[in-house]
Image: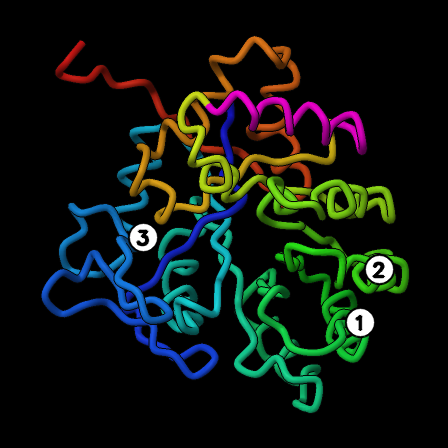
Amino acid sequence: MQIIDAHSHLWLRQDTIVDGQPIRSLSGNPSRSEFFGEERQMLPPFMIDGRNTAEVFLSNMDYAQVGVAVVVQEIIDGNQNDYLATVQSQYPDRFFCMGMLYDTRASSDLVSQVNDLAKTFRGIAIPGHRIQGSLLERMPLFKAMEAQKLILSMCLADDERQIAEMAEVIRECPELKVAIGHFGMVTTPSFRSQVKLANCGKNVRIESGGITWLYNDEFYPFPSAIRSIREAADLVGMDRLMWGSDYPRTITAITYRMSYDFILKSNGMTQEEKEAFLGGNAKSFYGFGQLPELPYIKNMSE
């Protein structure tokens, strides 16, 4: 089975300010971060230098037999364009890295930013849930992305505020490929509305990055997550859905392989549906070619 991760993160150094509050790795324990006034386990505890690098992720990918990963960006990690440009250059067959705008304000020169990022990246990640104001005020941004044939990774707020606006963006930019993240914030009331955005245009997909985080209280094997995948498939079709891990934050609680293994072992999906959800849909959406062959290596415990 070809497995593709449609939602992951990388960073060299987490040190930024969001809404006036610092988010940075703690000097005494860099696997933890100061996060909106709290101390959080941001990385698995074995990542002791605070660096969430491509090389460590590749080791996890090889172990879990994940061929390619899409690397998105989040404002809470700081802008990682320089590092991700290097990652894309060094590992073009293993990563699809998204750029991020330096300034998302509607008053900024969004089109120039898009055209500049298009020189390096094939997609742009926009944490829409952290944007102030209307998405429609930023329509030139989406039009420019459509013109540049860039893929949009978009996470939306966990309520209905942005749904109608996002639907309008999709209708106005019919050739723009859009991947809605966090599986439409599956545990919130906006889930069905977000998923049904995939019915607004032929180029819209829903990816499950963070689904194990959203069902963390239930924990492995996440039976409610399987039911939600089934519900989403009933709403828009299994061909519109893609797996994502939200690595590395989700593997503070589970292993990387566990972030999709619960799907493999479930009897709630057919083999054909598992193959489409875990890789086939993402392969066609992102235009990946031949994926690397990653044989299973037995554990010492086996």
- As rendered, which of 46 and 302 lies closer to the eye? 46
Say above or below: 55 vs 165.
Answer: above
Q: Amino acid at mark 1?
A: Lys
Instruction: Kindly indicate whether the residue at mark 3 contacts the one at mark 1 (C-beta within 8 angstroms).
Output: no
Q: Which residue sits furthest left?
A: 28
| Other-residue count near label 3 (Cα within 10 Å), few / some / many at <14 / 14–19 / ≥20 | many
Instruction: Kindly indicate whether the residue at mark 2 contacts the one at mark 1 (C-beta within 8 angstroms).
Output: no
Assign the magenta stretch its main secondary structure: helix
Left or right of 108: which side holds 244? left
Q: Amino acid at mark 3?
A: Ala
Numbered tag placed on residue 164 in the rendering? 2
Residue 134 lies, in percent from the top left, at 76, 75
Residue 291 lies, in percent from the top left, at 49, 33
| Of marks 3 and 2, the one in the foreground | 2
Residue 29 lies, in percent from the top left, at 13, 60
Q: Amino acid at mark 2?
A: Ala
Q: How many numbered marks, from 0 up?
A: 3
Sequence-first tag of 1 and 3:
3
Q: Is residue 287 visible?
A: no
Residue range in magenta is 222-237
Name the residue that disc number 3 marks. 54
Numbered tag placed on residue 143 in the rendering? 1
